[in-house]
Image: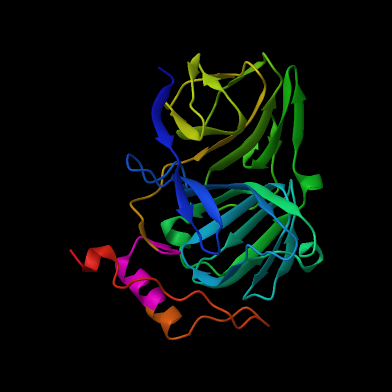
Amino acid sequence: MAIAHLFKSHDKDLGGGFTVRRILPAAARQSVGPFLFFDHMGPVEAQPGSRHDVRPHPHIGLATVTYLFEGAIMHRDSLGTEQRIEPGAINWMTAGSGIVHSERTPDDLLDKPRRTHGLQLWAALPREHEEAPAAFSHTPASEIPEIRFEGGQARVLVGSAFGQTSPVPTFSQTLYLDVQLDPGAEIVLDKLPEETAFYAPFGAIAIDGEDVGHNTMAMAEPGRAVRVSTQDGARFVVIGGAPLDGRRFIFWNFVSTSRDRIEQAARDWEDQRFVPVPGDDERIPLPQWPPAWRRD
C-alpha cells in the first residue's frame, strides 16, 4: 500500500461568510513535513459590492503560503507590504517573532462579480527560526519553474523537483508542487521527502491504483515511489518535507514549540503591542481565552 493515511476535509468558517475546507491539522496527524495547516478556499462566488475580507490579525512561529487558482487578494502587513496576490504566484509570509496582516478584496474588483479559489497553507518554522524577523516574499507566476512531460505538466512552487528549483526561500526541506494530468495519464514520483501528501483540487486521482476520495488528502508511505493516475484528468498538489523537529502548540493564529510563547503573543495582541498594518485600524479580536491546555 502506497497510502499511509487519508485525511478528509471539514468546513471551517473564517468569518464574513467565507468558509474553507480544512484538511490539516487532522485528528490522526498534526502535520505533513513543515505544513500544519492546509485550507482549500472556494471556489467562492461574490456579487458586486460584496466583500470577503479577512481583517488584520497576528501570527507568530510560522509562514503562510498563499496560492490562487482564480481571483485576486490584496495583502497588506505590518512591514508596510502591499501586494496584490494573483493566480500562479507564490506568496510566502514569514511571521517569525510576529507580524500582522490583512487579506482583502482589491478595490478594482469590488463592483464586479468574481470568483476566488485557492489554497492557503501554514508551514511551521524550525525551532531555531521560530523567532526569525518577519518577512514577506512574493514570487510572480512567471518565475515559478514549469515542466512539461508526456501526459501533463508541473510547476515547482516550493523546493526542488524534476531537476528544477523554486526561488521561494524556505527554512527547511520543503516541497510544494502543482501537477496537471491529462485524461488517462499517470506520473511516477520518486525521491520524495520523508513526509509527502497529495490533494486534488480539480478532478480525481488514484495512488498506485487506489482511488483518493473527493476533498481528501492522501499521505504516502515514506521511502517509495508513488504512481499517480487519473481517468478523466486532474490537477493535484504535492506537499511535504522533513518531519517537524518536535510537537507544535497551536492557538488561533499562533504556532510555537512553547506554550508560554503563545500565551505571551495572545497578551501582546490583547494589549495592542503588535505593530499594526499601516492605514488599517480594524482588527480581529482574540478568541475565547484561555486556550484548552489552561482549562485542563
Q: How many marks?
A: 0
Q: Which residue is rendered at x = 53% and y = 71% of the image?
A: 57
Display colour scheme: rainbow
Q: Nearer the viewer, residue 239 or 243?
A: 239
Q: Which residue is rendered at x = 77% and y = 47% of the image?
A: 141
Asked whether, in this view, residue 2 is left or right of residue 92, the answer is left
Asked whether, in this view, residue 99 is left or right of residue 148, the answer is left
Residue 226 is at least partly visible in this image: no
Q: Quadrant of the C terminus?
A: bottom left
x and y, in percent, of residue 179 in the image: 66, 31
Q: Which residue is rendered at x = 39% and y = 75% of the image?
A: 266
Range drawn in magenta: 252-266
x and y, in percent, of residue 13 in the image: 48, 57
23 w.r.t. 6: above or below: below
Residue 282 is at least partly visible in this image: yes
Q: Nearer the viewer, residue 199 or 165?
A: 199
Residue 257 falls inside the magenta stretch: yes
x and y, in percent, of residue 121 in the image: 54, 50
Q: Nearer the viewer, residue 18 or 71?
A: 18
Q: Quadrant of the N terminus?
A: top left
Q: Nearer the viewer, residue 156 or 26?
A: 26
- Determine which quarter of the picture holds residue 183: top right
172 w.r.t. 224: above or below: below
Residue 204 falls inside the magenta stretch: no
- Residue situated furthest left in the rendering: 296
Asked whether, in this view, residue 185 is left or right of residue 223, the answer is right
Asked whether, in this view, residue 59 is left or right of residue 167, the answer is left
- Determine which quarter of the picture holds residue 205: top right
280 w.r.t. 25: above or below: below
- Determine which quarter of the picture holds residue 157: top right
